[in-house]
Image: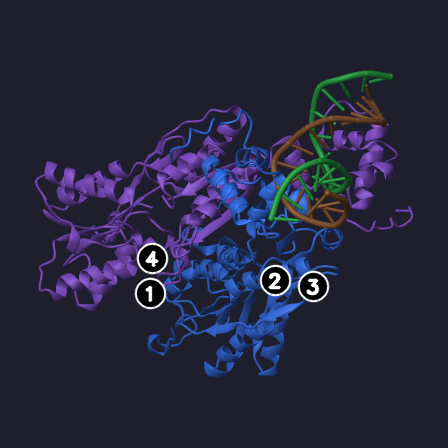
Chain colours: A purple, B blue, C brown, D green
Amino acid sequence: MGLPEPKRPKGPLTIYDVASRAGVSIASVSRVLNGQGSPRAATRDRVLQAVRELGFVPDGAARALSNGLKEVVGVVFRRGDETPFPDEDESFLFIDVIYRGIDLAARRQGFDVLMGSVGFNDGNVEARVAAVGGKADGLILHDRMIPATSITRLASLVPVVTLAGTPVPGAMNVRCDNDEGMRQLVRHLVLDHGYNELGYLSGRIDSPDNHARAKAIEAEAKAHGAQVAIGHDWQGDYSAAGGARVISGLLESGRKLPRAIVCANDQTALGVMHALGRRGLRVPQDVAVTGFDDVPVARHLHPPLTTVRQPMQELGAMAFAVLYSKISTGRGDSDVVLPVQLIVRESCGCAAAENGR
Amino acid sequence: MGLPEPKRPKGPLTIYDVASRAGVSIASVSRVLNGQGSPRAATRDRVLQAVRELGFVPDGAARALSNGLKEVVGVVFRRGDETPFPDEDESFLFIDVIYRGIDLAARRQGFDVLMGSVGFNDGNVEARVAAVGGKADGLILHDRMIPATSITRLASLVPVVTLAGTPVPGAMNVRCDNDEGMRQLVRHLVLDHGYNELGYLSGRIDSPDNHARAKAIEAEAKAHGAQVAIGHDWQGDYSAAGGARVISGLLESGRKLPRAIVCANDQTALGVMHALGRRGLRVPQDVAVTGFDDVPVARHLHPPLTTVRQPMQELGAMAFAVLYSKISTGRGDSDVVLPVQLIVRESCGCAAAENGR
DNA sequence: CTGAAAGCGCTTACAG
DNA sequence: CTGAAAGCGCTTACAG
């Protein structure tokens, strides 16, 4: 306003600059900035004015060190490496949706999200995770990217929540009800469509989610008298390329495909549909195909993909909630299971008209 | 190994715990951990072993405060609020792609990304941006979410890079060549297709990008003798709902639509195509429609959307590069312009066969 | 209500 | 090569 232009101090602005300009102690500045105590109105105003005039912003690192709270939650997940497979682009990485859930929930508590991704081929993942942990009050780990023992050890340093998998000792876990989702899907295929030969095109062999889904399909299929092809020849890796490779291999070896192919995830289903299309096989008339995840593009495929939707945004929100509880109260649920939803579109053989949503 | 179980100290593990277990000073621990100086092999080994045994991870806040580097880059952008418009889901927010570009570039320098999103209706955006700035070494701001003067002020505290817009004094800027992209698009429509009546369905009126695109279309259309409908009746807001609303309004008032509708972005184009479809108008036979951005789903629309691709991942990577330069050397480019690419699909009237990619 | 001072966990000259 | 000590910018008992 009418005040003389504040001469910018040489170094970065600190609380001392504000204090001296306002004619109070740094303790007072800190108090009005943080709403602690009951500063006199006059004090308050002078501090606020000085802050405004100088454009002061407190240093997060100093605050964190001082009060033991960074107000940062670290999130580490695997970033898919580049893939040239047609259509398998950014939109498939619904990890972003989990992120949004975390972000929204974190914001409500004044936390920010520190993002630490890891490529599949990155070395020294543990060091990277630890580094992020060192910059945060808590950690959300997607997938089992480091050994369980490492997670347990890390969890003794900073609260850890894992996503999608089974709980690890010492850490908390949040996941979707894969088992129930897969069972619903199988029932739809076997009971509603009458398919009695299924194939399970699996995800990465080391994935707990994959195991859970494989077990569920086998159990449910058996319960309803359907066959399910599964195993080595059906080994995918969660990628579209992997799904396409398996189908090509099967077809080239002259194998007859089952009536319906249940894929470990939507990306795999995409690859399967591509491979099928190349051989002139129609989906769903010749072979039904289903996915798992309900990534955004699933509904845009031809035909629209029948799949199981996992509530990813809620998953993220819940992960933060559990973590925040642990950070602030010292306790948090150790294994939260969220319900999933069967999304029936057309790739299973249902007609367009039947589609929900 | 054969060593006694390390008894966990009451408080969190610090460098003092490591030092005493290794029988050295904290200075030595710090040195081996950071690769400074030339510690004796024996010292090194003892420290490393103690670190391993205790599972020590240095506190990021303390490091940051001590050496003046947080190794964190803050990114703040607007998060679209929930929208129930069909198809306008997560996949449209290609901001995530920018993010990836930033993340990849940051990782290479040992930086992590602190994500601070802001909803369109959030109050006190400046405070939020400032808070993120206080936790980072530099800031990347998407869109002009706070006044230019605020950005300038903030930039005196911490290096700031803005994206998509015009440069602000004091801050650096990285953007795509909107102008050239729009001109190429108009030339394709007017010269290749012979459309001489265009309409520009604009973005938010306060958006610099929108102004740039509007100016470009007007200039290029005039240069080639085409008319362009633009202005109040054609005012959208970057959303699909906005695009649909404009078209409905135009049609209800009995207005004749131009031969081609150029939309400010892909989401708007999506809304336009929906509205057109509801009225029984065919794209591109009756009306051609184009977008801008090339979001992931653009190619999956019916018909596939002709649009202008902005290299979002590179935009992010460049933003970090510029910021990093500023942080480490004190200097950085103040306005970087990246080239865009015209993506011809079918919504402009081209046949499927002609499509690239 | 307010100020002086200690302390948060590191890093880094500065001496040895 | 290594240790003692200062200092990074805050917050928060502790006294007044």
Amino acid identity at mark 4: His
Q: Chain letter of disc 4?
A: A
User: What residue is pinned by disc 4?
Assistant: A300
Amino acid identity at mark 1: Phe
Relative placement, left or right, of A191 versus B237 is left
The answer as to whether the residues below labels 1 and 4 share one chain is: yes
Relative placement, left or right, of A229 versus A146 is left
The answer as to whether the residues below labels 4 and 3 share one chain is: no
Q: Position of residue B262 (x, y in %)?
A: 52, 68
Amino acid identity at mark 2: Ala
Instruction: Determine whether the residue tagged by mark 4 lies in a helix, strand or loop.
Output: helix
Instruction: Determine whether the residue tagged by mark 2 lies in a helix, strand or loop.
Output: loop
Q: Position of residue A61 (x, y in %)?
A: 65, 41
User: What residue is pinned by disc 2?
Assistant: B164
Q: Chain letter of disc 2?
A: B
Instruction: Determine whether the residue tagged by mark 1 lies in a helix, strand or loop.
Output: loop
User: What residue is pinned by disc 3?
Assistant: B167
| Local crowd size for mark 3, using a 10 Å CA cut-off: few (<14), some (14–19), many (≥20) | some
Please report contact status of discs 1 and 4: CB closer than 8 Å, yes or no.
Answer: no
